[in-house]
Amino acid sequence: MFLQQDIARFMNELKAESNSLRTFIEILKKEESALIAGKLEDIDYLTSDKTKLIRELIQSDDRRNVFFHKMGLSLDRKSIDSWLNELAEQNSEIKTLWKELLNLAKTAQQFTHSNGLIIANRLQHNQQSLAALHSAAGNAALYGPKGQTYI
């Protein structure tokens, strides 16, 4: 049914992916602090590390999907959960690793969303400041490439 070496390799992949996600979350936390403090130079530094980890996570996702296909699974949650429940009868650690991975992914998603809100807030503030400067300079309205008023 399931080859033990395939399952062992899959578990090692889950552990590695979880470690990558932990590192990614730490970078997102640092990014959040830098955004709040307005330290743009720190954000630039973090971007290269973040990009590298995103590539790693995409590769892990690809390998996981190949593994699921090899096991004859579709990539929907119901199919994967059913397979994990069946496998957990033989190896309970795999289900724990999977839940941990999902929780870490959710945490990363929450930090990404939060950082996006901070960026949007800063952008809005910068646009308002720019509009005020244009207004003070007597350049209240400019026009965009489609003829719309742009400040």
Image (cartoon, rainbow, N blue to C red):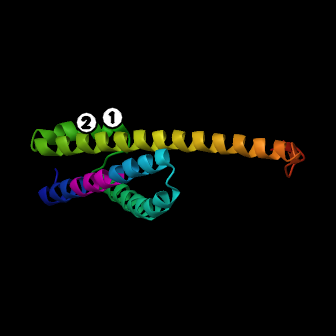
The reply to whether discs 2 and 1 touch (Cβ–Cβ < 8 Å) is: yes
Disc 1: which residue = 78
Labelled disc at residue 13: none
Q: Amino acid at mark 1?
A: Lys
Residue 42, x across and y down, in percent: 45, 59
What secondary structure prevails in the magenta region?
A: helix
Q: Amino acid at mark 2?
A: Ser
Q: Quadrant of residue 10?
A: bottom left
- Residue 148 located left or right of residue 105: right
- Residue 121 located left or right of residue 61: right
Furthest-front residue in view? 136
What secondary structure is marked by label 2?
Answer: helix
Label 2 – label 1 distance at C-alpha: 6 Å
Residue 131, x across and y down, in percent: 77, 42
Circle count: 2
Residue for point 12% across, 56% down: 4
Q: Residues within 10 Å of mark 1 (few under 14, many from 20)?
A: few
